[in-house]
Image (tube, helix red, strand yellow):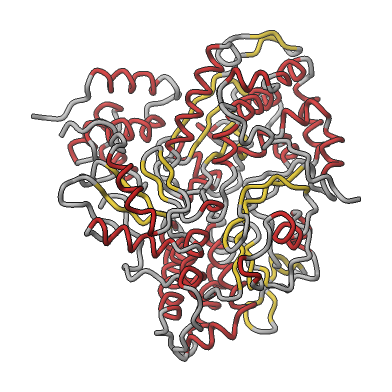
């Protein structure tokens, strides 16, 4: 069955369209809406976005692959973005990242087999004064040293999915 | 005259419970300056901002009033875009500002839009900042509900109505560059545009557009309330107002501090931030985000002001090779710059080559791919620097890095190329012996793990979002 947007998503898209003088400018927000709707951006999802905004599929494809937050493959319910840039690195972010990898049994860039977590080595999250920092959706984990990783993962499990509801 | 460290213009609501809700914000004076502004002529507001010596807080430090003055007279459609794409490593002020005081940002945008003749403004917020996007969206809803937005009001220059749209990015450092941000806002890949034309003449949707940083816009209400001259006198030289410094790295009390413009690095590190843990020496300081060349431990007595960091003769100029100064223009050596206020302090045990390699990996990851010198050059820098840091360096690698960096600098459409090249040249200029030692495979002398933090064993490119 071909993909389609839920009525709620369609309402959001219509509202988004009104914020811009042309349809193309709605491309990024509508890709966000699609990702929240389907969990990730499959080829079918990109085609649906292109159709919805009356844009060439190639354009939407080019945009979706340019930005790191658009996931082209399924990701876990919770996307963990662990910063390892300089301020965090100086305060031990790589120790934390290794600890996360160990606890989850995956490497940065991978998803746990149960589909619960995707671990991303992230660039500066603008939480430098509270390094090392990790973000999961709207929740910031600050001063995240290895001894606090278990507690953080436990809390993440109870958070809403990072990218909206999962239909597919 | 020692400046008053207690003057807070944009951070006065930090730590106040529920400061981001409109009722608390109103009690604390939010939106009061909008009425003052509406009784002024738009041109008078621009004049006041010029008089204030407010300089852009996003990185370039360009005078805000002068930028505003570039909008062509009689333009029918003008856009104001707030650049909230904070992602310069070491910088963490705009995120805090938006979280604690979103209504001050909206107030600043209303006044600025009135001054510029803008009827629809956009806030481009970094995609990763989901929490701050939610806070801002709620603040916008409240501002609409109370009629500060979306309702026509009478002003000295006739009826005025403003709409503000929050637009989320999707993960791309380059979109902090203003023309790239505009392309992204138009629904395209974030590729920077050639300038001229500058956005003030031809920007968003082909119309005159002013792009201002979050902190910049949040200073506008105070300038309207207390006058441009008051703001200018608070500052130092040609830089008005206070300055937020994001203090991170090896510090006893890291944090986001609003401080007098002329405060020296030494005062910030030792008086404000409590010095370096364990009483260690400062080895290096990045003064304005990782794009800026570092200062060494003997260069801490310079004021953290825009012009001082560029021109103070106590800062050793960056070199292309020993004895040959890198010049931005004939007779104008590159020292460093105030940038975005992201200050990263490194203690004596820090592995400078590893830090430099991490910075180069960042720029290689974030290069948009449009210009060859940057696309290829940042990748080379990341690879050569990483092998040096891993103790697999080859003879000549240090000079190779400097030569690649010199080949990038000044040869790209946007400043991302310079942002990689300048710190590369700066680190080699000031820590050349460490780079040379690594060519011979010498390990970094042992220090606490947290300080030397080995490089990841992962491949060169950071994991892309889609895993």
Find residue B214 and report its horizontal and vertical position in percent: 61, 37
Find residue B113 and report its horizontal and vertical position in percent: 65, 25
Find residue B446 and report its horizontal and vertical position in percent: 49, 81
Whether A79 is drawn above or below B415: the answer is above
Point 17% across, 31% down: residue: A167
Seen from the viewer's position, the closer of residues B192 and B128 is: B128
Question: In which quadrant is the C terminus of chain A drawn?
Answer: top left
Seen from the viewer's position, the closer of residues B308 and A78 is: A78
Q: Residue furthest toward the left?
A: A1
Seen from the viewer's position, the closer of residues A82 and B412 is: A82
Question: In which quadrant is the N terminus of chain A drawn?
Answer: top left
Say whether residue B450 is left or right of residue A60: right
The count of marks equals 0
Point 52% across, 51% down: residue: A130
Point 64% across, 39% down: residue: B215
Find residue A30 and report its horizontal and vertical position in percent: 33, 30
Say whether residue B256 is left or right of residue B163: right
Point 21% across, 33% down: residue: A166
Seen from the viewer's position, the closer of residues B452 and A26 is: B452
Say whether residue B157 is left or right of residue A69: right
Location of residue B42 (image quadrant):
top right
Whether A84 is drawn above or below B153: the answer is below
Whether B383 is drawn above or below B191: the answer is below
């Amino acid at each position: 069955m071909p993909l389609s947007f839920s009525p709620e998503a369609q309402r959001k898209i219509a509202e988004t369209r009104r914020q811009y003088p042309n349809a193309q400018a709605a491309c990024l927000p509508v890709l966000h809406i699609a990702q929240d709707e389907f969990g990730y951006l499959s080829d079918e999802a990109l085609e649906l976005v292109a159709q919805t905004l009356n844009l060439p599929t190639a354009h939407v494809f080019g945009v979706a692959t340019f930005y790191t937050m658009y996931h082209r493959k399924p990701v876990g319910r919770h996307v963990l973005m662990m910063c390892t840039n300089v301020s965090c690195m100086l305060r031990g972010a790589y120790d934390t990242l290794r600890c996360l990898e160990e606890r989850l049994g995956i490497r940065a860039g991978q998803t746990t087999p149960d589909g619960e977590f995707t671990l991303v080595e992230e660039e500066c999250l603008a939480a430098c004064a509270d390094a090392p920092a990790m973000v999961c959706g709207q929740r910031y984990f600050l001063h995240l040293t290895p001894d606090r990783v278990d507690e953080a993962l436990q809390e993440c499990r109870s958070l809403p999915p990072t990218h909206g509801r999962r239909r597919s | 005259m020692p400046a008053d460290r207690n003057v807070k213009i944009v951070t006065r609501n930090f730590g106040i419970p529920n400061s981001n809700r409109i009722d608390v914000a109103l009690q604390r004076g939010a939106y009061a300056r909008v009425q003052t502004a509406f009784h002024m002529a738009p041109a008078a507001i621009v004049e006041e901002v010029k008089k204030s010596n407010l300089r852009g807080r996003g990185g370039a430090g360009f005078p805000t009033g002068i930028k505003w003055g570039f909008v062509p007279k009689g333009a029918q459609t003008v856009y104001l875009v707030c650049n909230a794409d904070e992602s310069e490593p070491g910088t963490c002020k705009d995120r805090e500002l938006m979280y604690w005081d979103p209504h001050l940002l909206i107030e600043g945008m209303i006044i600025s839009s009135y001054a510029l003749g803008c009827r629809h403004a956009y806030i481009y917020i970094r995609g990763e900042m989901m929490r701050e996007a939610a806070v801002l969206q709620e603040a916008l809803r409240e501002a609409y509900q109370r009629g500060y937005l979306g309702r026509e009001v009478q002003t000295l220059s006739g009826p005025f109505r403003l709409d503000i749209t929050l637009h989320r990015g999707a993960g791309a450092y380059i979109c902090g560059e203003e023309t790239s941000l505009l392309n992204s806002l138009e629904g395209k890949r974030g590729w920077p545009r050639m300038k001229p034309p500058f956005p003030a003449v031809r920007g968003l949707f082909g119309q005159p557009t002013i792009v201002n940083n979050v902190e910049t816009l949040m200073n506008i209400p105070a300038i309207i309330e207390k006058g441009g001259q008051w703001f200018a006198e608070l500052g130092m030289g040609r830089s008005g107002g206070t300055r937020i410094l994001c203090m991170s790295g090896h510090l006893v009390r890291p944090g986001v501090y609003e401080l007098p413009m002329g405060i020296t690095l030494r005062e910030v590190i030792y008086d404000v931030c409590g010095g370096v843990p364990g009483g260690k020496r400062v080895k290096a300081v990045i003064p304005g985000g990782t794009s800026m060349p570092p200062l060494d431990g003997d260069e801490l007595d310079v004021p953290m002001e825009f012009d001082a960091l560029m021109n103070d003769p106590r800062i050793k100029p960056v070199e292309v090779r020993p004895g040959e100064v890198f010049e931005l223009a004939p007779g104008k050596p590159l020292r460093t710059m105030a940038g975005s206020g992201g200050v990263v302090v490194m203690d004596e045990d820090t592995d400078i080559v590893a830090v430099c390699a991490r910075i180069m990996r960042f720029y290689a990851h974030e290069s948009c791919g449009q210009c060859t010198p940057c696309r290829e050059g940042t990748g080379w820098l990341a690879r050569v620097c990483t092998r040096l840091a891993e103790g697999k360096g080859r003879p000549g690698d240090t000079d190779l890095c400097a030569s690649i960096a010199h080949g990038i600098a000044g040869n790209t459409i946007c400043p991302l190329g310079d942002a990689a090249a300048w710190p590369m040249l700066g680190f080699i200029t000031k820590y050349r012996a460490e780079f040379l030692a690594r060519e011979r495979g010498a390990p970094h002398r042992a220090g606490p793990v947290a300080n030397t933090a080995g490089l990841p064993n992962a491949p060169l490119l950071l994991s892309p979002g889609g895993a």
